[in-house]
Amino acid sequence: MLVTTEPENWKDIIYCGLENQQIDFKGPQDWVEIGRVGRAKFARHAIALANTLGGYVVVGVLEDENGNPRKYIGMTDKQAASFDPSTVGQTINQYADPAVSFDIARPVVDGKQYVVFVVYPFKDIPHVCGDACANELQTGVFYIRTPDARSRAARRASEMHALVQRALRNQRQMLGRMLRGILYEDRQADPTLTQSVFPPLLERARKHAREKLGALRFRERPLFELIVAPVTPFPDDSLAQIRAAIAAISGPRLSDLPRPRPRTHVQMSAHNESLSGTQVAPDGTNTSAWEYTQNGLLYCAVPFDGTLPSQIEAPFLQRLCALSIAVTSQLYTQLNHQENLLKLTVRIVNSQNLLLHGLAHAETEDELRCLIPDIEVHRERTAGDLEAGGIIQTASALFFDICDRFNAVFDEAGRAEVRLSFAKVVLGK
């Protein structure tokens, strides 16, 4: 999830319906009246979020009888006004070293006012707690936000290692931005360059995929395509750099599209200007094909090999969207292109009269049928935005855009459940 004071829709955050690694909920309260311990609790959440992926603390939502934050009470004017940014910032950063970067937003949703702490991930080094307070904070502790929505001390070696790795990556990114600023100062991007460079490379990648997956799958069967292209072509990376970046990916990998190892294996090939790979199932069937070019184009093709050629399964489509965006985030970050704007395109080829089956959490009960020949949806993001928490948000947005082409309708609770399922895929659960 991209952390910003201007999200596409505040409802997606406030009506999330559950706490997660990036969202915490608090009931309506007055900053002045909650006391030192209450304010220290906010500081703990802020430090933990900043040390992880950044995120939001939403004030004005109570838990229902099942313990889920779904009572949208909102706040009085007096309560909301008590969260003065200067006072709150001074208090929170009394406990954090270095200071946590955050904003306070006051969105009004369905006529109710809320206060939202918008906490940004650390840019240089992680935040350590510099002062103790009762049982809420301990001096010298690094607090982190866990996938099960706890803000607690990092006590495992793997958690400390992740903090160190994130700090090192941030410093590499800062150095990369500085070097690019020196190398490309006063050089203007030619808007026609991308239009002339990438189409022939994309056509070549499709041709390779067609050879590996079979012409029938491209011509008559539904096929998932991911196309990622930088707005401006990169200076060429070497094939060795690309191979090393692919090997260094720690989360979902290109070799996990569409199914994770060890049930499959990948055959990789080197070309003059690119690396390509094919996922091979145990029965010898090629189940996906991908190619990455030296100037930054990524193409992936995955056939929908279901029991019925006129139907695709929604859970499989969800998995493809989630894994595609997760892989994109890691690959471009490993290649140190995290600040470059990327155009993300997801296509479903041969979609006319195709049925979408197994879609949970949608309000629509009618048959979900697409009436257009090909589905194509887009987003523009940087890999840095994706890595900072935008994977689930972007993958979900692409999935909902695809579902719109099948006339599927979701309520807020349904959208929240879909995003939760995306989080489970990305986190490997």
Image: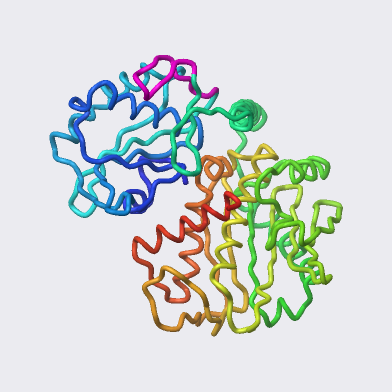
Measuring from the top left, give residue 276's x and y in whole percent: 80, 57
Question: Quick check: 45 above or below 384?
Answer: above
Q: Quadrant location of residue 308?
A: bottom right
Instruction: For residue 284, say whether it is visible.
Output: yes
Q: Is residue 154 left or right of residue 195?
A: left
Q: Quadrant location of residue 205?
A: bottom right
- Count numbered badges in the picture: 0
**At 60% across and 49% down in the image, what residue appears?**
231
Does 197 lie within the magenta span?
A: no
Q: Quadrant location of residue 344?
A: bottom right
Q: Nearer the viewer, residue 86 or 60?
A: 60
Q: Is residue 198 left or right of residue 94?
A: right
Specify the segment rendered in magenta.
125-140
**At 50% across and 80% down in the image, what residue appears?**
370
Question: Quick check: 375 above or below 320?
Answer: below
Instruction: For residue 185, say whether it is visible.
Output: no
**At 50% across and 82% down in the image, what residue appears?**
371
Q: Nearer the viewer, residue 154 or 45?
A: 154
**At 26% across and 46% down in the image, what residue appears?**
61
Q: Is residue 17 left or right of residue 200?
A: left
Measuring from the top left, give residue 222's x and y in whole percent: 64, 77
Q: Nearer the viewer, residue 298 or 49?
A: 49
Colour setting = rainbow
Question: Quick check: 133 above or below 120?
Answer: above
Measuring from the top left, give residue 131's x and y in whole percent: 40, 14
Q: Nearer the viewer, residue 173 or 68?
A: 68
Main secondary-structure element of the magenta-colored stretch: loop
Measuring from the top left, give residue 226's x and y in whole percent: 63, 61
Does 128 lie within the magenta span?
A: yes
